[in-house]
Image: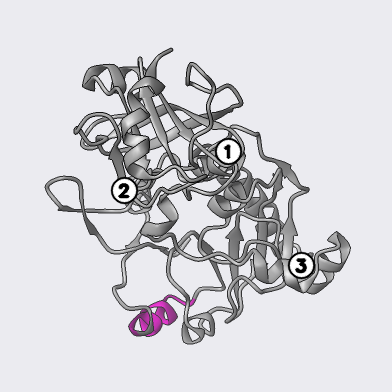
Amino acid sequence: MLAVVTQPDRPAGRGQQLAATPVNLAAQALGLRVLTPLKLRAFVDELAALGPERCVVASYGRIIPQALLDVAPLWLNIHPSLLPLYRGATPIQSAIRDGRSVTAVSIIAMNAGMDTGDLLAQTEPLAIAADETFGELHDRLAGIGAELLGDVVAADARGELFPNPQSQRAADLGIDDDEIARTATHPLDKADRVLPPYVTAREAVDRIRSLAPTPGAQLNPGLRPAVGTTPLPAFKILRAHVSHESPLADGRDLPSGTVVAHRGFLYVRANDAWIVVDEVVPAGKSAMPIAAFANGRRIDDVFVPEDDVVDGLGALRFRERAGELLAR
């Protein structure tokens, strides 16, 4: 191995001190040469001077320019999806968010496109557990990808790599162009972290799983207390499950997006059922069960979306009647 290339040191933690990437630290521990280019186009000559025959890319987080791809005869990219589905920056998160039950690990010969290169290897479809989070699936696929890469490198050394166009793999799997385009992924932004108010409970739980443990799902920031005056404290949701049992004594329906916090429990109303929050990360704290979070802050209220006018129930009328909704 000639060198390991990873992202430059970045500010991290509360003190925003410069910190090396985990890849950097691991490579140094193994006594490997580490390169951390700021700009990839300016890195072409330095990489060319090493004379690499093969380059391997895994979750680097930046687009490799064609000038850099031209330095080595073959670039291998480890991509955690059932290509040609879920190309792009967030394949694991997006597959979980979409409620997919299977994924895969693919290794492709890189080209200038976004994960469009020929397949050199791909696992059989791998099941995604119904409660598996992004972090859990990421770590599982990382181990599988490392083993698959070893097989590909060994096959390459024997001259037994047989590229397979992704169009052929799509035909084998019955995947059409519309599905390929629909599953293309993008880097997560702030809007992706917020639970949409008008979705099914299963869709909401899948989004929560797709964002755990980082960056973490968040509730609608426009919630207001309907009984008291204390706002809902800030937190990220790590785990939740679906319940078809109402937390309210009379079982009445509430607008989608409404939050009921009572007796150590926190419920979020979805279109078809309730989301029961199980684990959260309060601002500046570590992960904790919802009971510890709610009881420690004495949260007892109904929190309503700012723009809520559903089924003729105006905000003022709802505010007047909210107190009785907490009776269990």
**Between 293 and 185, which is closer to the camera in this rendering?**
293
Residue 149 magenta-highlighted: no
Q: Amino acid at mark 2?
A: Pro
Residue beneath the point at 86% across and 62% down: 174
Instruction: Give the vertical position of 68 relative to 1 (above or below).
Output: below
Quarter location, residue 179 = bottom right
Per the rendering, the mark at residue 159 is: 3
Q: Secondary structure at mark 2?
A: loop
Q: Is residue 274 left or right of residue 117?
A: left
* Dot in front, 3 or 1: 1
Question: First in sequence: mark 3 or mark 2?
Answer: 3
Per the rendering, the mark at residue 179 is: none
Per the rendering, the mark at residue 221 is: 2
Main secondary structure found in the magenta portion: helix
Instruction: Give the vertical position of 248 relative to 270 (above or below).
Output: above
Q: The C terminus lies in which quarter of the figure?
A: top left
**Between 124 and 44, which is closer to the camera in this rendering?**
124
Q: Callout 3: 10 Å neighbours few (<14), some, many (20+)? A: few
Quarter location, residue 60 = bottom left
Instruction: Give the vertical position of 296 relative to 284 (above or below).
Output: above
Residue beneath the point at 39% across and 61% down: 189
User: Magenta part of the protein: which range?
Assistant: 42-51
